Every structure is written in structure tokens, then in C-alpha cells.
């Protein structure tokens, strides 16, 4: 079945540092890929998405490129801020189960310090 | 502009009790999903509605779990005879489209603790 593997957290960075959160996936066919973010005390929010190979999703300074050859969708940001502290979830929407369900990774907590 | 609203936010139940969790999706949203998130894990799919029709309930872990959306708006997730392993955050999400694009709007969740 479909699965998503994320790097374990917590990841602790200083403000303005470069961020990478690794995500790899296993799926049949060509899934759509997503990053969701959960800020403290809030619900999950869609951060960015990519629907086909080599697509780059971007939002709020975050980017991720759909790499089919390495089955990866790593999240990057060039300069993180304290306000980026949150839990980040990689997810895919595949063909398994009729295309009705998102399959999520376990989440990576990011802490950004001054 | 209200988002997805869930209630109660926190629920403590004794083992064996029945619980009901409510979800108010964004007005006009066609699709509604329930997910279960155990501590330290990502959300896991439970069930999916398109309007009032429950099109997929493959993720419901047992027949103690039941979901409904009778008028195509508010949804209720009911858990009968709760067990300790049911302790989790239950997330509701909605989407304006009848086609699942993966772009969901999530509520803050209902945290269930079963003692």
C-alpha cells in the first residue's frame, strides 16, 4: 500500500537558517504530493502541493520538488523564522482506496529559536 | 468566514461508554472526511462523505465506529463501547469539490481520552 516516510524530529534551528525536511514515498502510479503544516493550537493547513513529476510547489518561502526518480518530496526554506515553528506533515493522494484518502507521514516538529 | 468547527474539543470517557463527535464543515463544502490521529503519528483516514452519501468507510477500525451526515452538512462520528485504544485526536476535514484533490480544510480536532 501507499506510505510516506519523513525524517524524525524535532528539528531545532536558529532563525535565518536553511531548512530541509526529508520526505520519501511509496505508491502505485503517479500520486499527488502535499505538505501540510500544523501551527500550535491550530488545525492542519495545506502548505503546498505538486501533482506530477518535476513540479515544484511553493508557498510562504517554502518549496518542494516532486522527484519521481528518487520518490521524494523534500521541503526546503532558505531562511526560517520563529513563526515557522510548527509540525510539518508530508502526504500523498494515490490510487489506493479509490483515491479518497490522503496518506500522511508521522510529522516533523520544527522549532526555530532566536 | 468560519472554518471547520469540531466539538467537543476535549472528551474524557470511561471505557465502555459511547461518544459522539460533531463536525460542522465549511458552508457549501461537498466533501467531508474523518481522520484519526494517534499521539506522535500522522492522521489516518477513517471515512469520506460526498454530500450525504458515505462513499468510503474503509478506514473505520471496527463496527463500533459509525459516521453519518444525514443532510449533507453537519457530520457526527459515533464510537460505541469505547476502548483505550480509541484514545486519539479525531480530525474532520472538508473540501468544496466532489472530486478529491487532496486540498482539505481541517478542523482543530476532538481529543478523546478513554480511561
Image (cartoon, rainbow, N blue to C red):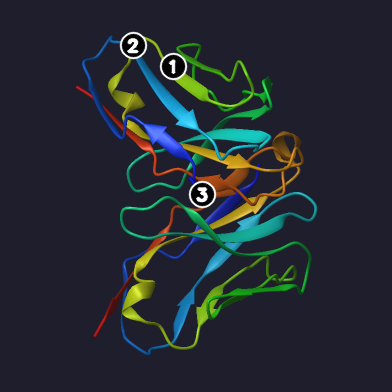
Mark 2 residue element:
loop
In front of the other: B52 or B40: B52
Same-chain status of marks 3 and 2: yes
Q: Give me the disc on residue A34.
A: none
Mark 1 residue element:
strand
3 or 1: tag closer to the N-terminus: 3
Q: Chain of mark 2?
A: B
Q: Chain of mark 1?
A: B
Report which quarter residue A8 is drawn in: bottom left
**Percent x, y for residue A109?**
35, 64
Q: CA distance from mark 3 to mark 1?
A: 27 Å
Q: Nearer the viewer, mark 3 or mark 1?
A: 3
**Percent x, y for residue A73?**
62, 68
In the image, residue B82 sits, relative to residue A10, either above or below, namely above
Q: Give me the disc on residue B78.
A: 1
Q: Residues within 10 Å of mark 1 (few under 14, many from 20)?
A: some
Q: CA distance from mark 2 to mark 1?
A: 7 Å
The number of numbered badges drawn on the structure is 3
Report which quarter residue A26 is drawn in: bottom right
Q: Nearer the viewer, mark 3 or mark 2?
A: 3
Q: CA distance from mark 3 to mark 2?
A: 32 Å
* Residue drawn at 44 percent across, 65 percent down: A7
**Percent x, y for residue B111?**
31, 35
Q: Which residue is mark 2?
A: B18
Residue found at the very far front of the displayed protein: B1
Q: Verify CB contact (< 8 Å) between mark 2 and mark 1.
A: yes
Quadrant the C terminus of chain B occupies? top left
**Percent x, y for residue A112?**
30, 77
Q: Give me the disc on residue B1.
A: 3
Amino acid at each position: 500500500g501507499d506510505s510516506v516516510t519523513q525524517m524524525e524530529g524535532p528539528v531545532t534551528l536558529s532563525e535565518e537558517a536553511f531548512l530541509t525536511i526529508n520526505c520519501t514515498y511509496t505508491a502505485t502510479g503517479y500520486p499527488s504530493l502535499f505538505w501540510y503544516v500544523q501551527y500550535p493550537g491550530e488545525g492542519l493547513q495545506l502548505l503546498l502541493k505538486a501533482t506530477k513529476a518535476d513540479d515544484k510547489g511553493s508557498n510562504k518561502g517554502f518549496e518542494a520538488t516532486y522527484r519521481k526518480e528518487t520518490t521524494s518530496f523534500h521541503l526546503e526554506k532558505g531562511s526560517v523564522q520563529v513563526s515557522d515553528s510548527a509540525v510539518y506533515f508530508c502526504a500523498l493522494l494515490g490510487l489506493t482506496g479509490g483515491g479518497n484518502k490522503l496518506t500522511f507521514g508521522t510529522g516533523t516538529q520544527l522549532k526555530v529559536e532566536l | 468566514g468560519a472554518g471547520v468547527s469540531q466539538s467537543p474539543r476535549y472528551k474524557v470517557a470511561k471505557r465502555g461508554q459511547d461518544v459522539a463527535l460533531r463536525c460542522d464543515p465549511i458552508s457549501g463544502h461537498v466533501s467531508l472526511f474523518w481522520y484519526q490521529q494517534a499521539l506522535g503519528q500522522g492522521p489516518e483516514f477513517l471515512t469520506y462523505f460526498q454530500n450525504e452519501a458515505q462513499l468510503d468507510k474503509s478506514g473505520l477500525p471496527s463496527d463500533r465506529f459509525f459516521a453519518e451526515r444525514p443532510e449533507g452538512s453537519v457530520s457526527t462520528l459515533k464510537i460505541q463501547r469505547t476502548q483505550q485504544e480509541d484514545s486519539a485526536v479525531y480530525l474532520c476535514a472538508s473540501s468544496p469539490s466532489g472530486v478529491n484533490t487532496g486540498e482539505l480544510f481541517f478542523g482543530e480536532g476532538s481529543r478523546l481520552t478513554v480511561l
